[in-house]
Every structure is written in structure tokens, then in C-alpha cells.
């Protein structure tokens, strides 16, 4: 790519802003991916002509060079660690920072996010309450001690128990009557010094030794300076120490899961099916904010094993009828039970004289009646498990056809009949919940905002922090009132529809609108299509549904041929692969006779319900046959209404390269700030990980990128598999090696953008989903380096300015309207509610945005944190852009809660999970598109066919 005059080259100032939201489902939305080229995109038949923009850049006619020299790529980013650490002067479009930078980073390997460029002013001001409670800092000194327990143990609960016994035994005599708090790992904290700097204690009852050694004092002065905005480096150790103090009492009383606490004492337990029950609890985390330290408290719930006999658990988990419990388990059921029970603790009931607990390591392959072992260390004498229990314990086993639980070692296994084992109470169920269980736990915990607010307030009052001996020891005080903060409601954007419709423009109300009297801004074309019926519905009924769907597609702007290439093909789900290939062969033969290059553009599939067949359909269609598909479940098709037909039509249109709507400002001289003034590409990225216990399943990364500047609604997607649990996206940049040329997701997307527009991107906006605060530095260092290398691999010194925004949904901040006039019908805050003051970071550029309308329960705002900004975004510019993009999500006529590029990356990742194992119904989500090179040990994804990869087939 030749460098154009006016190209942004190197980045300018550090600005800030970000946004995201979670997508709300369109009512009755059905099916999923698929696509085909139609009259959309760059202005085909039904495209809307856009007005000329204020600035236009010359079109480069020279093709981009294949790559730069390998040395240039490796010498890359002017040493990215140094480059990202430099404080830049803000560009003309950025607001001045609230306070000038004061400190130099302590390490070149630590990247300090840019300072807040100011606060937003756009929108109507409102008053909110947030579930944050102000914490006053102690006046006492906090001493930090290192704890080493030998022999070393991994159980945090056991660590806590050992330290508790130590304090009880030695508190008066050796610890100076202090009340230390312990973080269950290596850190112990006291309000004042202990009588020693280093000392070793023996816990004789457990045969452990505990060494305690002084590390230093928590720097509370630094913390005060940081809270006042006079110090840029966050004193994480001091905040951690105070957080441990506030968590000490609940950690001794309740089951601790990460930052949450659960107990039957905190609310009624509720069954969610499959031998699992829900426990109620609360989340607690101390956070630095602009108002000072605040304690973020939220109600919570999670799943635990029911404390029942293992036989009862198995019966409920497998949904066995009573008479089936006497027969053998199938191999499939045995494997399912093995996965469900491996790692849990059970207590045997046949030994009344002692309480014996065992950890389950597996399940025997043979049933109890066939299991033989050597009793009393006599290797030659074998005895069956059934006979042993009858002779030893006078117990006649009933489930002799079922396998035994395994404990002990591989060389000396212990066989435990299921009917003498009871699951120990208080063990969290960490496996992925099925759909029914998720529905049950959501139904039990779903609370309207006013109810949730009251529950949180009651939790804080019930915690009685003023009387907590540890909190009093350290001189901390916690407020009982939810914080009152200021928010703003951003106006919704104007949306553009086709000129042939009665309504050519639309301004959504309360985060939603409809397609009545509107036509898609770029309607796609479906001329060649077919239908596969896998349900028990008659083909005539399916044909009637397809006719209604085709008519609705035409009504809202698509060109949809009513007659399929072949008659509806009906097949049982067991023969789905054969049916798909038969449809492909028959339609290909017919279309080949009509001319070169004609292929099936869309395959409609009627599903009997949810199941393994969905993943297989997607994998075969997209990676083998090169067909985009739209799946519809029979329960949705049966008696479907116009809303359902409309939602399916929206999905089909973007799968055949159409566009449903665009932001009006993208089509006018007014333009979209930071988008229309120069060629801009918006990326969305996500990494999703396998469910616990899926040791052989990789993590999957998905990266989408906008291809239609300046409308930014059409997103191309790439996916790759990588080592499980790896958060950094490995294939953003792939260096040349041997005969393998330079590559990577960034490079591929930039080339695709150039090939479509004949313009190279002069600005990059990168929305990165799924990164926790503890991973900010590592992910930014690696991925910004990859972005730079991807750019430089296309042209020397091609370094368009980048804004890198992290999108976070997994947090516990909630907003509660103070005035009913500022609520929607669900009682939640209005769509467009943004908060960048009060509870936000003291110095860095972040904000919370609730861009969607609540449906049920309490809306969760999305947190956007700017980690890097060379484009000089102002607070208003980034907040407005992010909110407006949330109205362009393709699958429904609602604003969504996560910015679409991040949402699309999540959808694509889930699709790619189907490519790995053909069935993602019991997996965690992932991503999907063109498979990339993968790291050692990672599963190689099959490549998506070229005809599919460039459309939004993952929608």
C-alpha cells in the first residue's frame, strides 16, 4: 500500500473513551449464521447514495506490497514497550487532561493507560444510586507479613484453617494480641507491628510449620495521593490489604468463591435440576474511585452439588426412572457421570465408627459385581467388591450393575460403591450448566432494580461492619448508604433506511424501533435457495413458512425469489450430513446448467429443537460446502408472528451481504466524529475459553473488522484456535518462518479493507472484550505490538494511530434511578445512560454505559476502559460513538448492551467452537470465521470457505 498524503502515520495524543454493551435478543429471533452476496455493500442495486463528505482522500491505485523485510517487522514498533510508555501531547480534537502527568512509569514493561481527557457533557443530567459504599481509610499503620506453610498445600480453605488455628493458639502469647487478617495465600496483615520480624510456628495437630516474615508497611500515604489524583501508579498492595480486612469475617463464615461468599444462611437454597442446587450470596470488592475507596457489594448466586447420596445424584443427573436404576449404565452415561463427579469429596456411610471422606478420582469401567481386588495386602487372594461389603460390613449392595467411584492412586485404587457415598455439603458445581439449569438460576435470582437495591442495602446493614472485630482493629469504617452519583442520558442516533420506504429515517425511542414502513438500506439478493426439513412437520407446512418468510424479506427491502431451486428436502437428524451433501450435489448440478458461477446462496434449515445437529450443520455448510445457512427451530416456526419473520429477515440480509440500517450521520456532510474524516477501521476481538474440565479443548480467538467505511456496519471475521486458557490473541500477527510468509489477523483485515475500498485505514479503533483488570498490561503490551507489526508488514512506517478500548461485562456495578421519570418500563435506567464520574477510576479514561433497554431484572452497564489512545478522543466523542454503534447491531431492532464489534467477535467465537467438536451446546462460547495458523498443542480449525468468509455468516 502506498502511503497516501494526509495519512496519519504515527499517532498523536493520548485520548480516551470506550464503550460496549450486551446484546438484547430480538423477540422471537431464530436460527443463526449464513450469508450470500446481494445488492448491498458498496452501492449495488438497492444501495442508498450518500452525500459527499467534507474531506476526501485520494484513492491509491497501487496494490500493496506483499510484505516488508523481516528485519523491519522484528525491529517493529520502535520498541513497543518504550513507545507505549511515552506520554504524548494531546491532539487538537482531545480535551485537555484533568491534571498533568506527574510521575514517570517505574518500569518500561508497565504501560500506564492514558489520563482522562476530561468529563463528558453531552446528554441530559440525571441522579443515580450505585451499589458502592464509601470506605474511610484507617489512621493506623498496616504491616504486611509473608506466610510460608510447609509442606506446601494448594487448598486455600485449608490454608485459612491452619492460620486460624495458629492465631487461636499463639495470639495472646506471640502475636501481641493482634487480630491479623490473611488472604488465604501468602499475605498476612496486622494493624501495628508484631513482636517479631520473623518467626516459625509449629501446628502440631496437623504437622505443619508456618513461617511468618515481615515484608514492610502498606503505603497509605501513596494511596491517599492516588485517590486525590496526585499519583498515577495505583498502590495495589495497599488496596489489597484493606480488601482482605473487609473480607476476613465472611471468609471465615461462608464458602468463598473468588470475590463472592455463599451460604444457606444468606437465603433459601433452590434446586436447578441435575443434582445441583443454587446458593445465594454476595459479591464484595474494594475499588479506588473518584470519590475515594468504595466497597462494591452485589447480590449473587451460584451452583453447588446437592449433599445427597451419590445414587440419588446419578438418578437426577441422568434423569433415570426408578426401574432403570437396577440395570447397568451405558458407556455414554458412565462417562458423563465420571466428568460430573471427578474431583468432588464424598463421605462414606457404611462405617459408623468413623467419619471418612474421599476425593473422587474417577469411575470404574466395570460394574461393582465384576470388580475384584486384593484384600488385606494379599496380592494373590482376590475378592469382589460385592462379597467384600457383605462379609466385612454385613451390607448387601443393591446397585451391583453400577460402577464404583474411584479414589486413592492408580496403583492402589479404592473402590467405593455409589450407594455408600454421600456428597459432602458446600462443594461448588463448576461444570457448565445446561440451558434448563441456567434458566432456573436466572429465574430464582432475577430481581427488578428497586428489589435488588433493597436487597443490597439489607446485605450491608446485616454485615454490621461497625461491629466487625477485624474492621474495628484496623480503624476502617464503611458507609451504609448506596453512593449517589451523577449520570447523563445520551440521545439516540438517527438511523437511515432506504429511500423507497415510507420512513426513510428513524430515531429510536427507549432503545427500540421496528421495520414498519421501512426498507433495508441495502437489501440483499436471494435468488437461489433451498430448504432442509429435519423436523416432524409436514413439508407443505414448511413450504408455507418459507413463503411467508420470503414475502417478509421482500416487504422490507430484499430481493427474494419465492421458488426454491429444489423442493424441500426432508430427512431425520441422524442423516443430516448425508442430507446436506445431497442438497449441495443436486442444486449444484441444476445451477451449473444455468451458467457458470451460480451457486446456492442460502439454505434454510428447520430444526426439531436444540441439539448436536446444529453444530454439525454449521461446520459442514461453512467449512466444507461453502453455503450460508439460516436455522429455525420448530417451536419458533410454529405459529410464528410478523416479529419473528422480521428478525429472521434481518439475519438473512446481512448473511447475503446486505445492510439493514446505518447511522444517518455516516451518509451526510455532518459525518461521524473520528470516523468519517478519514478512512477508519473498527476492530472487535474476543477470546473464549473451554468450560472447566474440558482439558483437550482449545481457547478460540475471534477478531472482526469493519469493511464498509464510513458506515461501519459490515464486519468481516477471522478466528483461530490457541492454547487453552491463553488470553492474548496469538495470531494477531504471524511472523515469517521458513517458507511461511508473514500473516496474521490484523494484516488480513487491513488488506481486505484496502481491497474493498482502495483506501488504507488511517485510523484504528480496537474494542477488546474479555480482559480482566489483572491482564490489562500483559494483553496491551502483546496485542499492541502485534497490531504495529501487522501494519508495518504491509508498508514501511505505516503506523495509523490506534485507540485500544477494553470492554467489560463481568463486573458487579449496577445503577438505580433516583427518579421514576428517568426509568424505562422495566424500572431500569434509560438506554444511553453513561457515567464517567464518582465511581469511575480516579485518573484513567473509563466510563460505564447502559446502551440498551432493560427487559427483565436489573440492567448491567458495560464498562469501557481506554488502555491506549493515539487518536485523541474526548470523553464525549468516544461515549457518543460507542452508544451510537450499539444501534447498528444487525440481528434485531433494539440497541444492544455491548458495542457490536465486540458482540460480533463473541458470536463468531461461539460458531468456531462448533468447528472444533461439532457441538458447542455444552461448551463455553468461542468465535468463528477463517481458521488461522495455531500454536503448538492447539486444535487446528477447519477453514471457512471463501464464498462464506467475507459475509456476516455468524449472525
Image (cartoon, helix red, strand yellow):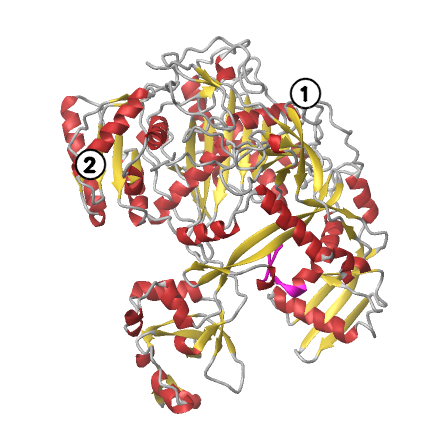
Q: Nearer the viewer, residue 784 or 399?
A: 399
Range of residues picked out in magenta: 252-263
Residue 466 highlighted magenta (yes or no): no
Closest to the camera, between mark 2 and mark 1, is 2
When the figure is inspected, residue 759 is found, relative to residue 646, above or below; the finding is: above
At horizontal 60% and vertical 63% (from top left) the residue drawn is: 265
Q: Which mark is residue 91?
A: 1
Q: Secondary structure at mark 2?
A: helix
- Is any atom of residue 913 visible in this view? yes
- Is any atom of residue 733 visible in this view? no
**Residue 746 point in image, percent of width and height:** 49, 31
Q: Which mark is residue 419?
A: none
Disc 1 packing (10 Å; few <14; some 14–19; many ≥20): some
Q: Relative to residue 931, is residue 265 drawn left or right?
A: right
At horizontal 48% and vertical 36% (from top left) the residue drawn is: 23
Residue 749 falls in which quadrant of the image?
Answer: top left
Q: Which mark is residue 541?
A: 2
Q: Quadrant of the C terminus?
A: top left
Q: Relative to residue 384, is residue 546 drawn left or right?
A: left
When the figure is inspected, residue 788 is found, relative to residue 422, above or below; the finding is: above
Q: Relative to residue 816, is residue 177 drawn left or right?
A: right
Of labels 2 and 1, earlier in sequence is 1
**Residue 811 point in image, percent of width and height:** 59, 44
**Residue 315 point in image, percent of width and height:** 36, 67
**Gap in angstroms between the C-alphas marked 2 and 1:** 61 Å
Residue 259 highlighted magenta (yes or no): yes
So how many labels did they put on this image?
A: 2
Q: Secondary structure at mark 1?
A: loop
Amino acid at each position: 500500500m502506498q502511503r497516501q498524503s494526509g495519512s496519519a502515520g504515527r499517532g498523536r495524543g493520548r485520548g480516551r473513551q470506550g464503550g460496549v454493551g450486551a446484546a438484547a435478543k430480538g423477540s422471537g429471533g431464530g436460527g443463526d449464521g449464513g450469508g450470500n452476496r446481494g445488492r448491498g455493500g458498496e452501492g449495488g442495486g438497492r444501495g442508498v447514495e450518500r452525500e459527499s463528505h467534507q474531506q476526501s482522500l485520494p484513492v491509491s491505485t497501487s496494490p500493496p506490497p506483499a510484505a516488508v523485510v523481516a528485519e523491519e517487522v522484528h525491529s517493529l514498533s520502535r520498541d513497543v514497550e518504550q513507545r507505549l510508555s511515552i506520554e504524548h501531547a494531546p491532539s487538537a480534537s482531545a480535551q485537555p487532561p484533568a491534571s498533568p502527568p506527574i510521575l514517570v512509569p517505574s518500569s518500561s514493561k508497565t504501560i500506564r493507560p492514558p489520563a482522562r481527557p476530561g468529563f463528558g457533557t453531552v446528554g441530559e443530567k440525571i441522579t443515580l444510586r450505585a451499589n458502592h459504599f464509601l470506605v474511610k481509610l484507617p489512621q493506623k499503620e498496616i504491616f504486611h507479613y509473608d506466610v510460608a506453610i510447609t509442606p506446601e498445600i494448594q487448598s486455600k480453605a485449608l490454608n485459612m484453617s491452619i492460620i486460624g488455628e495458629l492465631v487461636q493458639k499463639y495470639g495472646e502469647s506471640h502475636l501481641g494480641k493482634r487480630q491479623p487478617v490473611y488472604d488465604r495465600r501468602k499475605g498476612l496483615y496486622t494493624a501495628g507491628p508484631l513482636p517479631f520480624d520473623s518467626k516459625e510456628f509449629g501446628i502440631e495437630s496437623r504437622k505443619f510449620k508456618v513461617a511468618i516474615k515481615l515484608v514492610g508497611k502498606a503505603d497509605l500515604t501513596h494511596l491517599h495521593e492516588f485517590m486525590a489524583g496526585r499519583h498515577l501508579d495505583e498502590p495495589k498492595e495497599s488496596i489489597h490489604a484493606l480488601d482482605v480486612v473487609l473480607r476476613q469475617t465472611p471468609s471465615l463464615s461462608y464458602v468463598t468463591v473468588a470475590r463472592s461468599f455463599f451460604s444457606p444462611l444468606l437465603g433459601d437454597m433452590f434446586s436447578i435440576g441435575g443434582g445441583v442446587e443454587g446458593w445465594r450470596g454476595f459479591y464484595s470488592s474494594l475499588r479506588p474511585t473518584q470519590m475515594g475507596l468504595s466497597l462494591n457489594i452485589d447480590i449473587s448466586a451460584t451452583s453447588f452439588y446437592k449433599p445427597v447420596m451419590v445414587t440419588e445424584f446419578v438418578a437426577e443427573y441422568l434423569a433415570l426412572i426408578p426401574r432403570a436404576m437396577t440395570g447397568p449404565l451405558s458407556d455414554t452415561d458412565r462417562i458423563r457421570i465420571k466428568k460430573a463427579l471427578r474431583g468432588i469429596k464424598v463421605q462414606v456411610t457404611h462405617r459408623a465408627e468413623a467419619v471418612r471422606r474421599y476425593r473422587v478420582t474417577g469411575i470404574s469401567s466395570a460394574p461393582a459385581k465384576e470388580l475384584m481386588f486384593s484384600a488385606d495386602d494379599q496380592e494373590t487372594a482376590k475378592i469382589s467388591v460385592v462379597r467384600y461389603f457383605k462379609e466385612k460390613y454385613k451390607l448387601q449392595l443393591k446397585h451391583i450393575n453400577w460402577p464404583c467411584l474411584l479414589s486413592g492412586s492408580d496403583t492402589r485404587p479404592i473402590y467405593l460403591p455409589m450407594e455408600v457415598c454421600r456428597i459432602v455439603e458446600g462443594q461448588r458445581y463448576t461444570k457448565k450448566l445446561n440451558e434448563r439449569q441456567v434458566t432456573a438460576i436466572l429465574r430464582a435470582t432475577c430481581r427488578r432494580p428497586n428489589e435488588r437495591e433493597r436487597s443490597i442495602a439489607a446485605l450491608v446493614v446485616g454485615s454490621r461492619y461497625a461491629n466487625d472485630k477485624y474492621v474495628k482493629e484496623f480503624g476502617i469504617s464503611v458507609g451504609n448508604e448506596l453512593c449517589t452519583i451523577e449520570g447523563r442520558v445520551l440521545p439516540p442516533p438517527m438511523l437511515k433506511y432506504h429511500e423507497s420506504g415510507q420512513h426513510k429515517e428513524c430515531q429510536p425511542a427507549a432503545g427500540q424501533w421496528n421495520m414498519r414502513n421501512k426498507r433495508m438500506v441495502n437489501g440483499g439478493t436471494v435468488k437461489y435457495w433451498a430448504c432442509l426439513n429435519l423436523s416432524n412437520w409436514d413439508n407443505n407446512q414448511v413450504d408455507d413458512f418459507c413463503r411467508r418468510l420470503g414475502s417478509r424479506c421482500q416487504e422490507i427491502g430484499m430481493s427474494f425469489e419465492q421458488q426454491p431451486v429444489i423442493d424441500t428436502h426432508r430427512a431425520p437428524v441422524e442423516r443430516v450430513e448425508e442430507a446436506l451433501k445431497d442438497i449441495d450435489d443436486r442444486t449444484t448440478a441444476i445451477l451449473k446448467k444455468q451458467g457458470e458461477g451460480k451457486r446456492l446462496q442460502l439454505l434454510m434449515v428447520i430444526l426439531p429443537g436444540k441439539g448436536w445437529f446444529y453444530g454439525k450443520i454449521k461446520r459442514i455448510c461453512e467449512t466444507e460446502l461453502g453455503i450460508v445457512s439460516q436455522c429455525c427451530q420448530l417451536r419458533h416456526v410454529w405459529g410464528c408472528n410478523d416479529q419473528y419473520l422480521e428478525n429472521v429477515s434481518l439475519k438473512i440480509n446481512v448473511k447475503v451481504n446486505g445492510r439493514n440500517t446505518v447511522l444517518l450521520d455516516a451518509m451526510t456532510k455532518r459525518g461521524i466524529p473520528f470516523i468519517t474524516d478519514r478512512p477508519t477501521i473498527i476492530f472487535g476481538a474476543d477470546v473464549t475459553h473451554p468450560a472447566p474440565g474440558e482439558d483437550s479443548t482449545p481457547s478460540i480467538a475471534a477478531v472482526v473488522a469493519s469493511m464498509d467505511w464510513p458506515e461501519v456496519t459490515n464486519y468481516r471475521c477471522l478466528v483461530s484456535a490457541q492454547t487453552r486458557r491463553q488470553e492474548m490473541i496469538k495470531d494477531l500477527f504471524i511472523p515469517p518462518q521458513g517458507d511461511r510468509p508473514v500473516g496474521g489477523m490484523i494484516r488480513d483485515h487491513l488488506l481486505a479493507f484496502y481491497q474493498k475500498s482502495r483506501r488504507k485505514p488511517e485510523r484504528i479503533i480496537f474494542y477488546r472484550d474479555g480482559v480482566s483488570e489483572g491482564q490489562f498490561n500483559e494483553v496491551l503490551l502483546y496485542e499492541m505490538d502485534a497490531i504495529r507489526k501487522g501494519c508495518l508488514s504491509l508498508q514501511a512506517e505505516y503506523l495509523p494511530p490506534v485507540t485500544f478500548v477494553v470492554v467489560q461485562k463481568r463486573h458487579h456495578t449496577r445503577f438505580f434511578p433516583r427518579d421514576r421519570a428517568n426509568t424505562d418500563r422495566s424500572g431500569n435506567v434509560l438506554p444511553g445512560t453513561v457515567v464517567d464520574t464518582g465511581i469511575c477510576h480516579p485518573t484513567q479514561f473509563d466510563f460505564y454505559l447502559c446502551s440498551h433497554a432493560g427487559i427483565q431484572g436489573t440492567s448491567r452497564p458495560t464498562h469501557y476502559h481506554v488502555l491506549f489512545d493515539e487518536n485523541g478522543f474526548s470523553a464525549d466523542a468516544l461515549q457518543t460513538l460507542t452508544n451510537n454503534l450499539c444501534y447498528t447491531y444487525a440481528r434485531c431492532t433494539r440497541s444492544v448492551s455491548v458495542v457490536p464489534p465486540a458482540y460480533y467477535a463473541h458470536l463468531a467465537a461461539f460458531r468456531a467452537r462448533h468447528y472444533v467438536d461439532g457441538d458447542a451446546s455444552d461448551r463455553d462460547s468461542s468465535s468463528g470465521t477463517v481458521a488461522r495458523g495455531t500454536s503448538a498443542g492447539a486444535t487446528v480449525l477447519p477453514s471457512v470457505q471463501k464464498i462464506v468468509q467475507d459475509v456476516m455468516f455468524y449472525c
